[in-house]
Image: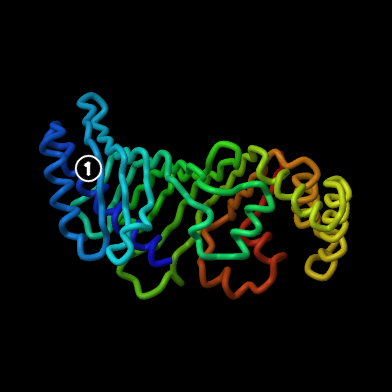
């Protein structure tokens, strides 16, 4: 966790430095600004890179061969092929806009220090380093308190991609809690690229079953357990269950969308207390494949 926090701090400093430099339209000045921002966090992280390039037409800045590591463990560096910053608000304490991509985040499964996760991934056939890609863009309107996550896309080839969009209201970075934040809309889309099928095949092998037998057992378990949590008379909830079963049987992808008739506060969601109420409050829809 400390390593991930250090990495986040390092990437944040790098992004601020990158985007501040773009106003000068020269890689030399951009690099100087990056180095200045890196110096501000060098008590916590070690950041290295090989080259900075500026696209004067699109105003994009690309930093190549980035390495970020906790100061107390420089050997545990996370390496990133490219950090691309298209837009970044470096004037506000809480950035009002971010548009950036991280390409080729070298994620070593064995360095998670989570034996259960490491064992699970190895059984599923994933070992060593995975190259992740991240694209994100959001805007924050200080006057209205609205946060719009226009894009969040994380994944890798041979695994799949998770995409999300989100709109929140009544958000303030200075608020003591998020209880007053309201959810206007949200959507999560997952596109599988063999990961889910591979994981289920691995779990089936562990229980001495073929994958189709395992899927049948899993689907049956969902149907049996659902009766304890939701009403079979609720068509919306039953649709959610049926779509979940459809994904298990043929895991190409799924989408989960929330479009409440009016914004729902976080505190109301927390006090709802049951999956069935959440489905109703959020006007939740799930669709497989």
- Judged left or right of residue 180, residue 31 is left
Q: What residue is shown at x 36% (from left), y 75% (from top)?
A: 176
Vertical order, 136 against 110 (above or below): above
Residue 88 in percent (x, y) is at 26, 45
Residue 58 in percent (x, y) is at 26, 27
Out of 85 and 159, give the one closest to the viewer: 159
Residue 249 in percent (x, y) is at 81, 44
Q: Secondary structure at mark 1?
A: helix
Where does the C terminus fall, quadrant-wise?
top right
Q: What residue is shown at x 25% (from left), y 43% (from top)?
A: 49
Residue 72 in percent (x, y) is at 30, 67
- Which residue is the extreme one toward the front? 75
Residue under numbered circle 1: 19
Q: Quadrant of residue 177?
A: bottom left
- Judged left or right of residue 41, residue 198 is right
Where does the N terminus fall, quadrant-wise?
bottom left
């Amino acid at each position: 966790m400390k390593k991930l926090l250090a990495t986040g701090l390092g990437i944040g400093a790098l992004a601020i430095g990158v985007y501040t430099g773009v106003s000068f339209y020269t890689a030399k000045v951009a690099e100087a600004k990056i180095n200045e921002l890196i110096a501000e966090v060098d008590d916590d992280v070690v950041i290295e890179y090989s080259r900075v390039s500026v696209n004067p037409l699109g105003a994009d800045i690309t930093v190549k061969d980035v390495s970020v590591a906790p100061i107390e463990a420089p050997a545990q560096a996370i390496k990133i092929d490219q950090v691309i910053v298209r837009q970044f608000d470096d004037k506000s304490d809480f950035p009002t806009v971010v548009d950036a991509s991280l390409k080729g985040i070298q994620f070593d499964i064995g360095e998670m220090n989570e034996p259960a996760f490491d064992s699970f991934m190895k059984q599923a056939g994933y070992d060593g380093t995975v190259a992740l890609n991240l694209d994100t863009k959001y805007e924050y309107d200080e006057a209205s308190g609205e946060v719009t996550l226009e894009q969040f896309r994380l994944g890798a080839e041979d695994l799949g991609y998770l995409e999300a969009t989100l709109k929140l209201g009544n958000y303030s970075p200075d608020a003591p809690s998020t209880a007053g934040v309201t959810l206007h809309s949200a959507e999560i889309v997952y596109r599988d690229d063999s990961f889910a099928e591979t994981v289920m095949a691995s779990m089936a092998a562990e229980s001495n079953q073929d994958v189709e037998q395992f899927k049948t057992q899993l689907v049956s378990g969902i149907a049996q357990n659902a009766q304890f949590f939701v009403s079979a008379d609720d068509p919306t909830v039953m649709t959610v269950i049926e779509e979940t079963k459809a994904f298990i049987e043929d895991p190409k992808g799924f989408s989960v969308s929330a479009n409440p008739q009016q914004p729902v506060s976080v505190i109301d969601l927390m006090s709802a207390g049951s999956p069935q109420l959440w489905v109703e409050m959020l006007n939740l829809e799930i669709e497989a494949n």
